[in-house]
Image (cartoon, rainbow, N blue to C red):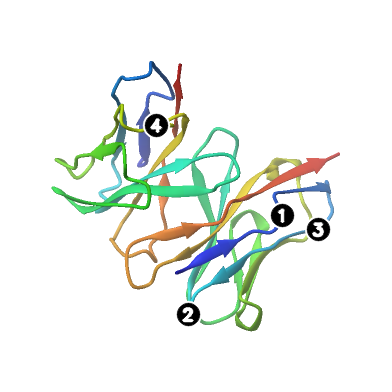
Amino acid sequence: DGGITQSPKYLFRKEGQNVTLSCEQNLNHDAMYWYRQDPGQGLRLIYYSQIVNDFQKGDIAEGYSVSREKKESFPLTVTSAQKNPTAFYLCASTRGSGSYNEQFFGPGTRLTVL
Amino acid sequence: AQSVTQPDIHITVSEGASLELRCNYSYGATPYLFWYVQSPGQGLQLLLKYFSGDTLVQGIKGFEAEFKRSQSSFNLRKPSVHWSDAAEYFCAVADTGGFKTIFGAGTRLFVKA
């Protein structure tokens, strides 16, 4: 079955550590997205990528980094520069790069900073 | 800039009762509008979308939504709620000139027996 996988489901980090969240899709989608979800705030866009080897900052990119070396993979690194990283992180993909496309979401990774 | 407002943080309805979740958007042109549903600890799933044409759109799981340009609204409805509908619902508007989708803060639905 096609879909998006995110790992790990739960992640704990000590302050000052970088962590990388995995996102893989086998839908052959061109565009991929990372969102952060906090209670009562909906989803906020961190980064997005329309094609391989290209990505753009979203609304809250500070303290995060991404790469898109393969079409199916879009890992997110939460760096120590992110002051409040505890949140639920969602990865999504769309077949085309336009915003009118339906977004397909992974199950999410919950990151907790200890 | 585009924005989406979901006025109700949470709503409780009895099983079998009708449901309406409110969504208001701010956008200059004809928007692309979506409703997504999220079960606890999961990703989002598309319920329905509106791009143009008939202002009443049907979605999955028995949901429908009506686009009202004069009110800048895109409310989600279901005639009879099931306990399995308990989840968080997000209204979203797409940036038709770019690549972003703007999500509302969400409305959490509780269903009581």
In this image, B71 relative to B82: left or right?
left
Q: Which residue is mark 1?
A: B8
Above/below status of B18 relative to A36? below
Residue shown at 18% from the left, 42% from the top: A68
Q: Nearer the viewer, mark 4 or mark 2?
A: 4
Q: Residues within 10 Å of mark 1 (few under 14, many from 20)?
A: some
Q: Earlier in the sequence, mark 3 or mark 2?
A: 3
Residue A89: x and y, percent? Answer: 43, 36
Circle 4 sits in a helix, a strand or a loop, which is it?
loop
Above/below status of A6 relative to B94? above
Visible in this render: residue A23? yes
Judge by depth and name the residue closer to the eye, A108 or B55: A108
Q: Residues within 10 Å of mark 2 (few under 14, many from 20)?
A: few
How far apart marks 4 and 1 lie (CA) works out to 30 Å
Subunit bearing disc 2: B
Judge by depth and name the residue closer to the eye, A36 or A10: A36
Kind of residue sitting beneath label 2: Gly
Subunit bearing disc 3: B
Q: Which residue is mark 3?
A: B18
Point out which mark residue B28 bears: 2
How far apart marks 1 and 2 lie (CA) works out to 24 Å
Circle 1 sits in a helix, a strand or a loop, which is it?
loop
Q: Are marks 4 and 1 on the same chain?
A: no
How far apart marks 3 and 4 lie (CA) works out to 43 Å
Residue B43: x and y, percent? Answer: 49, 40
Q: Are marks 4 and 2 on the same chain?
A: no
Point out which mark residue A58 bears: none
